[in-house]
Image: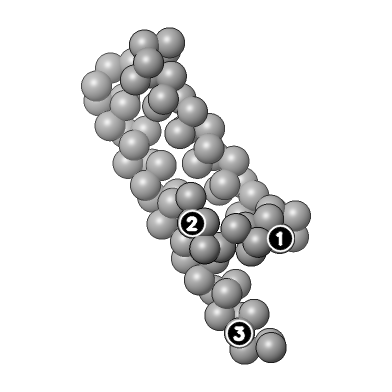
Amino acid sequence: MFPEHRDLITELKTTDRHFLQLFDRHNELDQRIKNIEMHLEHRTHEEVETMKKEKLRLKDQLYAVLQRAAAARTIGS
């Protein structure tokens, strides 16, 4: 996810608690969805769709944090 921001992600995971919480929740949902798709975990179609929507919302929030942090880096340089 966001390979162009790999270094910034690593930094934010250690300096921004909110970012870390979003990141961890996104990864948790990603793994659960994969498990469901591999039939390792059972959920209804509606539950899976809800998880996918939440994962997308989290990804959007993560990207917004990354954009702000990248802009702050540029201004601070």
| Amino acid carrying mark 1 in the image | Glu
Residue 34, percent from left and from top? 41, 25
Q: How many numbered marks does the figure carry?
A: 3
Q: Position of residue 33 (x, y in %)?
A: 40, 27
Q: Mark number for residue 2? A: 2
**What is the three-letter code of the residue carrying label 3?**
Thr
Crowding near the residue tagged with mark 2, few <14, some 14–19, many ≥20 C-alpha atoms within 10 Å:
few
Q: Residue at x 36, y 11 (%)?
A: 39
Q: Which residue appears at 45% of the width and 34% of the height? A: 30
Determine the residue positioned at 65% across, 61% down: 7
Residue 16 higher or lower than 47, as above or below: below
Image marks 2 and 3: residues in contact by CB distance under 8 Å: no
Q: Earlier in the sequence, mark 1 or mark 3?
A: 1
Q: Is residue 51 left or right of residue 65?
A: left
Image height check: is 65 above or below 14? below
Q: Amino acid at mark 2?
A: Phe
* Image position, residue 37 (x, y; %): 34, 20
Q: Count residues near mark 3 (Cα–Cα under 10 Å), then give few for <14, some for 14-19, many for 20+.
A: few
Q: CA distance from mark 1 to mark 3?
A: 15 Å
Q: Secondary structure at mark 3?
A: helix
The residue beneath circle 1 is 11
Q: Is residue 18 left or right of residue 4?
A: right
On the question of residue 4 being in view, the answer is yes
Residue 46 image-quadrant placement: top left
Local crowd size for mark 1, using a 10 Å CA cut-off: few (<14), some (14–19), many (≥20)? few
Does any portion of residue 65 appear in the rendered image?
no
Q: Nearer the viewer, mark 2 or mark 1?
A: 2
Q: Is residue 77 above or below residue 57?
A: below
Question: For the point 28% across and 32% down, which residue is it?
Answer: 49
Residues at marks 2 and 1, CA–CA distance in whole angstroms? 14 Å
> Taking 6 as reference, is 62 left or right?
left
**Residue 74 disc label:** 3
